[in-house]
Image (cartoon, rainbow, N blue to C red):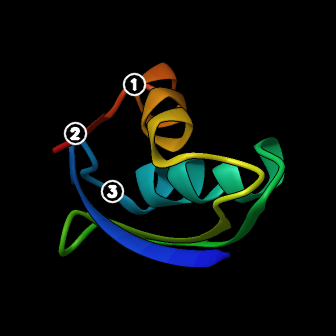
């Protein structure tokens, strides 16, 4: 089933940070859309929960050097 989550992100401070976080769309199977706003420090993710979990998404965010709170 398709899910949508909005995560508050610590450490996202510039447009390059937002672009880096949006790259999870290409890195992880099962993500339909990843949209980041560094002004609001949020990441919106639309994903297929039968393919990928929120925990895996959070782990990838951490691997990129940010923290989803």
Q: Residue 69 location, x and y as percent?
A: 16, 44
Placement of 58 over or under 17, stated as above or below: above
Label 1 sits on residue: 65
Residue at x-position 83% and y-position 49%: 29
Q: Residue 68 versus residue 13: which sits nearer the camera?
A: 68
Foreground mark, 2 or 3?
2
**Disc 2/disc 1 C-alpha distance (Å):** 8 Å
The residue depicted at 52 percent of the width and 50 percent of the height is 21
Residue at coordinates 66% horizontally, 49% vertically from top-left?
Answer: 24
- Which residue in the protein does label 2 denote? 11
55 sits left or right of 37 in the view = right
Q: Residue 63 appears at what percent x and percent y?
A: 50, 21
Q: Secondary structure at mark 3?
A: loop
Is 14 situated left or right of 50 in this image? left
Q: In the drawing, what numbered circle is on residue 14?
A: 3
- Provide residue 66's location: percent of width, then percent of height: 33, 33
């Amino acid at each position: 089933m398709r899910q949508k989550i909005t995560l508050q992100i610590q450490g996202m401070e510039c447009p390059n940070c937002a672009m880096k976080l949006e790259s999870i769309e290409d890195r992880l199977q099962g993500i339909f859309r990843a949209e980041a706003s560094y002004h609001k420090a949020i990441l919106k993710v639309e994903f297929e929960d039968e393919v990928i979990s929120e925990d895996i998404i959070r782990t990838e965010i951490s691997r990129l050097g940010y923290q989803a709170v």
